[in-house]
Amino acid sequence: MALRKLSGDSNCKSGTCPTLWATEDDTAFLVQGYVVTDPEQLAQIGLPEGETVVRVPVNILEDYFRARRN
């Protein structure tokens, strides 16, 4: 299934910056971000096995939602 880039830093090199993607059928978002390793934060979330949490700076999502309103 093809992905569509929705938002992210245009100066990003090698795809390592936080980025928001959508599936071609618009049924899901994929988020590329920084893995959260803080044990206190992870304990508060209580993740099921096989899941992880990534941190995405607010400006990445703001850019996406701002563009959707225009």
Image (cartoon, rainbow, N blue to C red):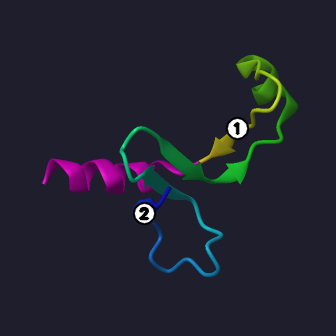
The picture places residue 70, in percent across and down from the top left corner, at 13, 54
Classify 41 as above or below 24: above
Classify 70 as above or below 17: above
The picture places residue 14, in percent across and down from the top left corner, at 64, 80
Question: In the image, is 18 to the left or to the right of 45?
Answer: left
Q: Residue furthest front?
A: 1
The picture places residue 39, in percent across and down from the top left corner, at 86, 31
Please report the residue visible at 44 percent of the width from the left and 56 percent of the height from the top: 60
Residue holding disc 2:
5
Q: Secondary structure at mark 1?
A: loop
* Closer mark to the observer between disc 2 and disc 1: 2
Q: Secondary structure at mark 2?
A: strand
| Real-space Cα separation, disc 2 to disc 1, in angstroms | 20 Å
Question: In the image, is 1 to the left or to the right of 32?
Answer: left
Please report the residue visible at 61 percent of the width from the left and 73 percent of the height from the top: 15
Q: Amino acid at mark 1?
A: Val
Most foreground residue, 68 or 22 = 22
Question: In the image, is 33 to the left or to the right of 35?
Answer: left
Most foreground residue, 18 or 40 = 18
Give, as a single range, the part of the protein colored magenta: 56-70
Magenta stretch prevailing secondary structure:
helix
Please report the residue visible at 41 percent of the width from the left and 61 percent of the height from the top: 4
Classify 26 as above or below 64: above
Earlier-in-chain disc, 2 versus 1: 2
Is the residue marked by circle 2 packed among few (<14), some (14-19), or many (20+) residues within 10 Å? few
Is the residue marked by circle 1 packed among few (<14), some (14-19), or many (20+) residues within 10 Å? some
Asked which quadrant contains residue 18, the reply is bottom right
Residue holding disc 1:
53
Label number found at residue 31 = none
The picture places residue 58, in percent across and down from the top left corner, at 47, 48
Q: Amino acid at mark 2?
A: Lys
Please report the residue visible at 23 percent of the width from the left and 56 percent of the height from the top: 67
